[in-house]
Image: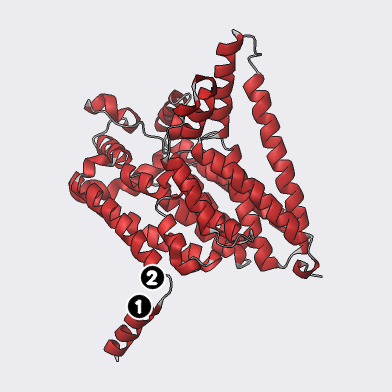
Amino acid sequence: MGSVKIKDLIKSCLECKALPGMLVMAVIFVMGVLSTCLHPLEEADFLGLYMAVVAFKQGLNPYHAAAVLHLKLYPLLYLPYALYLFYPFTWLGYALAARIFLTLKLMAIVGLLSLWHRLVNLNQYRGLFYAVVPLAFGGGLLWDWRLGNVSIFEQLLIWLGFYFYCKGRNTVFGVAIILAASLKFVPILLLGLLAARWRKKELWLGALCFVLFLVLVAAGAAAWPDLTGSFWENLHGLRRETGEGNAASWEFINDVTDWLLLKTGGRLPALAPFVIYAVLVGGILAVTGALFWRLRQMEQKRADLWRICLTCLAYALIVPRMKGYSYIILIAPAFFILNSSRWVNPVLPFYGLLVLFTFRSFQFLGPNLEPFYCFQNVYYCLWLACVLFALCCRCIWRETASPTNRSG
């Protein structure tokens, strides 16, 4: 009986039209797995976390682990209670712990792909979207894999929340977002999705989840006041992160104003970046709110997918810190938007944008256009998010204007 089931499973896999894309994706991931498994010290983020917990177990300040242990480590940017999540890894040697961590990340990626497929059906176009997954948005997944960051677990929680949101289980969605934000603060903004249907009950639930998150943070600060102070010191010490390490709109605005200051001899007001950023955030939120209102006309299942896409894109465009691997949140929305845009084959423009990223040198344009090719190089993911946001808005406007898509 068991052998029959295994044969049926193998047969269904072989008959799956998405198999070519899955195989390409698997090859890319295997190459990444082998490289990182052979050289676990490349996982800089995990190394920093591991050594911070080691220092903590020795009674030292984990937020000063680099100075205390005389090692070159990334500063610890997680709240004190997160240290206990990594305690079990320090029961093992670093090399073995790093490989177990990679295995857990691989399982998380499989779970994430499963959630994406359930929501947006990745099997279309013979699974070519699968082949894009490791490369999309500057190879965000591979970047996360190489650094040993926890971003993939954060994304798994976020998309688990989105999945339950589409099922109407908003409380589970709220809990998932709180758990994701407990690793990094910024995802708590995704609770704004509970305002998307303009329902009072969901607004109250969103407010309650936000308060619970603040209580969690406050409880951690009360339990470990000294460590929490060190955490804020590390966070403040980041100051400005520019370049591909933080392709966020806030940093782009700062880079542009810095360039203009050089050209104008320092004649720009000091508050100019803050004003521009405030206008940008206000404009994105206004457009997003207006489209949420229009989506009330649409059948709920499809409208929920559009709400998720719009929320993810607005989130990516307004948060002040957006690392390369944080753009993983836009991979599934990009597939859904391109598939809904009425192109003959939506895979082609997405691959075209990836080629644009690969062809990184635009210096042939000459020195007068230097800002263009510099900003294109550094802020590629941000540009792609802007294009997708505009396309998302267009698709929602078109579909809500069509009588066939109205719920009546």
Q: Name the image quarter holding residue 401.
A: bottom right
* Crowd rating for badge 1 (residues with CA inside 10 Å; few <14, some 14–19, many 20+): few
Q: As drawn, which residue projects farthest toward the top?
A: 265
Taking the spot 56% from the left edge, 39% from the top edge, the residue there is: 383
Q: Nearer the viewer, residue 223 or 274?
A: 274
Q: Is residue 209 visible?
A: no
* Crowd rating for badge 2 (residues with CA inside 10 Å; few <14, some 14–19, many 20+): some
Q: Name the image quarter holding residue 272.
A: top right
Taking the spot 67% from the left edge, 36% from the top edge, the residue there is: 281
Disc 1 target residue? 14
Q: Which mark is residue 38?
A: none
- Up/down of 187 relative to 294, above or below: above
- Up/down of 109 relative to 242, above or below: below
> Where residue 231 sits: x, y (%)?
42, 31
User: Residues at badges 2 and 1 in contact (C-beta under 8 Å)?
Assistant: yes
Residue 16 appears left or right of 147: right
Q: Secondary structure at mark 1?
A: helix
Q: Nearer the viewer, residue 369 or 287?
A: 369
Q: Quadrant of the C terminus?
A: bottom right
> Where residue 130 sits: x, y (%)?
43, 61
- Up/down of 313 relative to 401, above or below: above
Taking the spot 43% from the left edge, 55% from the top edge, the residue there is: 132
Label 1 amino acid?
Answer: Leu
> Where residue 336 sits: x, y (%)?
57, 59
Disc 2 target residue? 19
Residue 346 appears left or right of 61: right
Q: Nearer the viewer, residue 50 or 74?
A: 74
Q: Secondary structure at mark 2?
A: helix
Q: Is residue 293 visible?
A: yes
